[in-house]
Image (cartoon, rainbow, N blue to C red):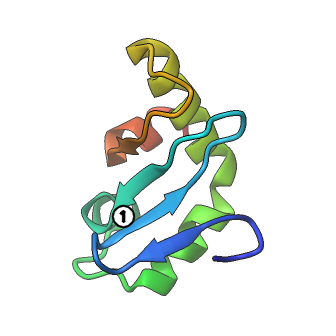
Amino acid sequence: MTADGLLWRAEIDALVFRPAGHGGWCAVHRLAFRALLGRREPAPEDCLAYAADHRGALEAAAAGKIARRGYDVAASLHLTSRDIADVL
């Protein structure tokens, strides 16, 4: 896990983090980063760097999805590239 709480989970090919004020995990699959980065095969390091640089957008996208869907405080969720792009 990086200092900012971002973690790459190879078994699900996704970045995960805990959104502020939320107990569940939020996942962003490598395919979402493909669209966001415009690269066919982004490496986990590329995805982690993008997420660190755009942490505010990830947090905003997660908070919006949690609110819209009415997720329980411990529920896990995933973000799509569209979820993130909508707040950039």
Pinpoint residue 50: horizontal percent, then vertical percent: 55, 68
Q: Name the residue at 66% across, 53% down.
A: 55
Amino acid type at circle 1 is Phe
> Which of 16/37 is in front?
16
Name the image quarter holding residue 63. Answer: top right
For label 1, count other residues whose C-alpha is less than 10 Å away and answer few (under 14), some (14-19) or many (20+): many
Q: Is residue 87 left or right of residue 27?
A: right
SS under mark 1:
helix
Pinpoint residue 64: horizontal percent, then vertical percent: 52, 23
Location of the N terminus by quadrant is bottom right
Q: Name the residue at 71% across, 40% down.
A: 20
Name the image quarter holding residue 79. Answer: top left
Pinpoint residue 80: horizontal percent, then vertical percent: 32, 45
Compared with 59, 1 (above or below) is below
- Which residue is tagged 1? 33
Location of the C terminus by quadrant is top right
Q: Residue furthest right?
A: 3
Q: Is residue 17 left or right of residue 43?
A: right
> Which of 68/9 is in front?
9
Q: Is residue 28 left or right of residue 45?
A: left
